[in-house]
Amino acid sequence: MLALAAPGILYFLVFYYAPLLGYVIAFQDYQPFLGFESPWVGLGNFRDMGRDIKFWQAVSNTIQITVLQLVLYFPAPLALALLLNGIISTRVRRFVQTVVYMPHFLSWVIVVALFQQLFGGAGVMSHILRDGGYQTFDVMSYPPFFKWLAVLQLVWKETGWGTIIYLAALLSIDSSLYEAAAADGADRWRRMWHVTIPGIVGVTILLLILRLGNILSVGFEQILLQRQAVGPDAAEILDTYVYFNGVVGGQWGMTAAAGLVKGIVGTILVVVANKLAHRMGQDGVYR
Amino acid sequence: MIEQRAGRPPWMEQATLLERAGKGIVLALVSIVVIYPFITVVATSLATEREITRNGGLILFWPGEISFNAYRTIFTGGVVTKAVMVSIGITVVGTVLSLVTTTGLAYALSRPIIFGKLILGMSLMTLLFVPGIIPNYLAVKQVGLLNTYSALVLPVMINAFNLVVMRQFFMGIPQELIDSARMDGAGDFRILTKIVLPLSGAVIAVVALFYAVAYWNAFFNALLYLNDNSMYPLQLILRNYVLQRAPLPGAMVPGEESGAPPAEAMHMAVLVVALVPVMVVYPFLQRYFTRGVLTGAIKG
């Protein structure tokens, strides 16, 4: 039995636990040719990080995008699921489900390329505006719109997939509750309010808590692809800050420190979020 | 696919025409918003030079005249053909390796084994504390995988979410079945291949899809670990040429009568090549999604 498990265990040791040891460089003035023998600098890297304006810019952008995601993206799957649940024809429901699940499986490169085709300087929208005699501009590289655009891309890609969990919760509502409510004279809206909403409030709160646990992660690949076109002022998030200043810019120690801080804060948030979920009688991501 | 109540139950009132029309319009709009981008991409990839120039760089709905020139050019060798081969290779090898190791570990963890709790905890830890880019990069460098294709597979070989989905499924297989096979003298490996796996087609299909899509779609690992441009997989080629609008080799040079396909058509053709494999496997596996997503998301 352990022989079956061995390759998997080995994987976690070599590619998860051993890399964690690499975080020692957060406390070193890491030089690639010295490797882990680089001189120790104590908490110097953390101090440099705290003094770096670009770091705080990245924190601020990350949090702004998270907030926009919570407001614009989070309710979208719930709304679509409620709408789909109200469709009686199985064929229509299946068709819509087949269509809306699909973007989930596309890569971010493809999604961004599709958006460029629609909203870029040479895209469909500019085309239509130009034909109508209006002035056009490249939405894809316009910094003030970038955060909204990023959230819109997320909505397009993941709303359909996000409905799965709500549809399952809606399906598990005992249909005799609806029948009894109808017999008591409750109309469609009252049944929604008194049966449907209480039936899905649990899973909604659970998903909200889990999202709160991940507020520092806002889609690394997606943002990385567009950072160059938009510029770092609007599009630098924590993960791209680490990549561009560390791997590209060579400030290994300081960006390792930033990564470590992000990892620890993220872990604390997930643990707290799970505690909250348990307290509400939900399972959370782990038990 | 979620099985749902069929037809309107007797207690439910008939929806008004206005209500049904409203729902229909919203759902139709949602579907169009998802489908339309693909139409313009495919249309542009099939269009001729004359039409693209007349339309200012793209085709909105469907080209009047269809030309496969762009596809012919990208597949006559060169960067795109190479990148497609690389991506197929990584996806196939990676998915097989991931499935074998994940299945082994998930099966072992689905039975009462020594240190089972500890090993499960070790695996779930990866969902809790995500190591950043820097330590991953240093580790890959340390084991000497920089600039090799192994760096695109080994560091992401097992996904704890997929592991949990499989383990959850295997836990539903009765212990008596396994005990009786063991009584007949079968070892762990035989039990797994002859008894457990034949019962697990659904979960294997869905986990295979998740892994294959992840390998096919990944671009950042390649950007991080490969220095050599000629090794790039398709998604990175897509980023370099389509997102950054560099003309692909073999594309028509503006203002020159050469009969070569226009750059826009070639970009869109590469995009189509990158999304077709996903579109082809997806419908076959769709009915397994719900179970896969739910066991993974709720239990752990």
Image (spheres, rainbow, N blue to C red):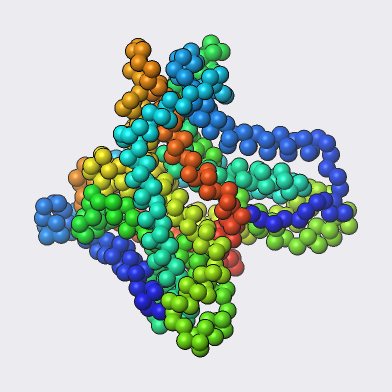
**Residue A135 image offset from top left, x and y in percent:** 49, 14
Which of the two residues, A260 or B177, is positioned nearer the viewer here?
Answer: B177
Which of the two residues, B120 or B73, is positioned nearer the viewer here?
Answer: B73
Q: Is residue B153 toward the left or the right of residue A177 in the image? A: left
Q: Is residue A151 toward the left or the right of residue B141 in the image? A: right
How many numbered marks appear? 0
**Residue A179 image offset from top left, x and y in percent:** 84, 58
- Kindly indicate the quadrant of the structure image that contains residue A19: bottom left
Residue furthest to the bottom in view is B183
Which of the two residues, A194 or A230, is positioned nearer the viewer here?
Answer: A230
* Residue at 41% in and 29% down: B72
**Residue B280 image offset from top left, x and y in percent:** 53, 45
Which of the two residues, B110 or A201, is positioned nearer the viewer here?
Answer: B110
* Residue at 56% in and 23% down: B62
**Residue B201 image offset from top left, x and y in percent:** 55, 64
Residue A81 appears in the picture as rendered: yes
**Quadrant placement of the N terminus of chain B:** bottom right
- Kindly indicate the quadrant of the structure image that contains residue B254: top left
* Residue at 89% in and 57% down: A183
* Residue at 35% in and 16% down: B258
Residue A186 appears in the picture as rendered: no
